[in-house]
Image: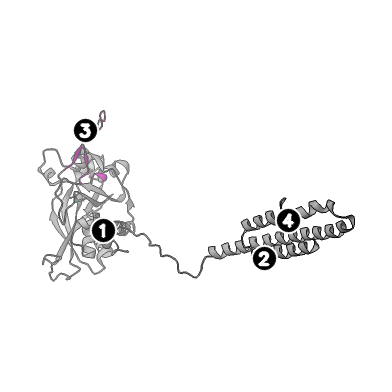
Amino acid sequence: MIEQLEELRARALEELGRIEDLARIEEWRVSYLGKKSELNQILRGLGTLAPSDRRAVGQIANDVKSVLEGESTARRVQIEKMLRQAEIARERVDVTLPGRPTRLGQWHPLTAVTREIVSAFRAMGYDIVEGPEVEWETYNFELLNIPAEHPARDVWDTFYVQAPDGLPGGKMLLRTHTSPMQVRVMQNRKPPLRVVVPGRAYRYEATDATHESEFYQIEGLAVDEHLTFADLKGTLTAFAHAIFGPERRTRFRVDFFPFVEPGAEMAIDCHVCRGAGCRLCKNSGWIEIMGAGMVHPRVLEGVGYDSSQYSGFAFGMGPERVAMLKYGIDDIRLFKTNDLRFLRQFAL
Ligand code: DAH
């Protein structure tokens, strides 16, 4: 029986040494230390032995039991440690791998150009204001000296919208230009004032390479005592230098806009051919970039300013056109198609 115990111990330990997972350890425990195990049967049968054998066999059997218990616990701890290490190895992060590049966003070219234009004016002391795209007809037309029957209204093909019931303001429309903000600003401020107004405008027009029915404008207005056309020219020339280069020359020619008198159209000498004539300037050497003029006395009086005390100048330009000229873009529709191949060229 002592031999049997020794053989049992050797077998159990040998088997234990080969076990590599926790479930098998449990099975091992049941078969070698469980109720129905050989060892337990020996222990339970001790009472049937002669008293002289009982002591010796009992001691050895109990030794075997405690060795097996101790060894199986040790093996379990060892296996748990191996499993943890394997898991850590599996989850290890290779910190030497290069990172995945993240692409930074960038301004839309129109946003970038608008910011550039606006900051050229900010440097000259202008405030930036914005106004409603859905506008009263009176602000868009009447208060800008464009009465209902005036033929000049035909220049602005207008989207009218249904005004909400119960509002007293007359007809509503999508503003056809940012000029109505001239009136709103003058109604809310006293001279001296200088503002630029970037924003959207809308016209009921067919779309082509140079026209969109939804587009941007940047309006400008300065009102003070003693402002003259010389101030207008100086300011807009400084703007042209900031945006198109300090060597630009400017040209002002008479033009008509109902809300200014005199009215002008401003051009810069072509920055591609420097005035010699090329495709961009259609061989004229000049590129028209905005409308401008001295604020009409009727517009000043319309907001309650004394036109004998105050004078002002105003201007309006299209940032799409400025961007197209600056970057040689030949179709205005590219700004709105969201083609990333186009947009990514302007990491400005
Ligand atoms: N509002 C005009 C347009 O949309 C542009 C313009 C011309 C604005 C002359 C002005 C100005 O302020 O003085 O065609």
The quadrant of the picture occupied by the N terminus is bottom right
| Way the structure is coloured | one colour
Q: Is mark 4 within 8 Å of ligand 1?
A: no
Q: Position of residue 190 (x, y in %)?
A: 32, 44
Crowd rating for badge 3 (residues with CA inside 10 Å; few <14, some 14–19, many 20+):
few
Calculate the distance from the C-alpha at mark 2 to the C-alpha at mark 1.
Answer: 67 Å
State which mark lies toward you, 4 or 1.
4
Instruction: Work out whether residue 209 or residue 169 is closer to the camera in this orientation and state it.
Output: 209
Assess whether mark 2 and mark 3 are in contact (beta carbons under 8 angstroms): no
Q: Position of residue 216 (x, y in %)?
A: 24, 51
Crowd rating for badge 1 (residues with CA inside 10 Å; few <14, some 14–19, many 20+):
few
The residue indicated by pointer 4 is: 38
| Secondary structure beneath label 1 | loop
Kind of residue at disc 3 = Gly
Q: Position of residue 113 (x, y in %)?
A: 28, 59
Kind of residue at disc 1 = Asp
The residue indicated by pointer 3 is: 170
Assess whether mark 1 and mark 2 are in contact (beta carbons under 8 angstroms): no
Kind of residue at disc 4 = Glu
Q: Which residues are magenta?
A: 158-181
Kind of residue at disc 2 = Gly
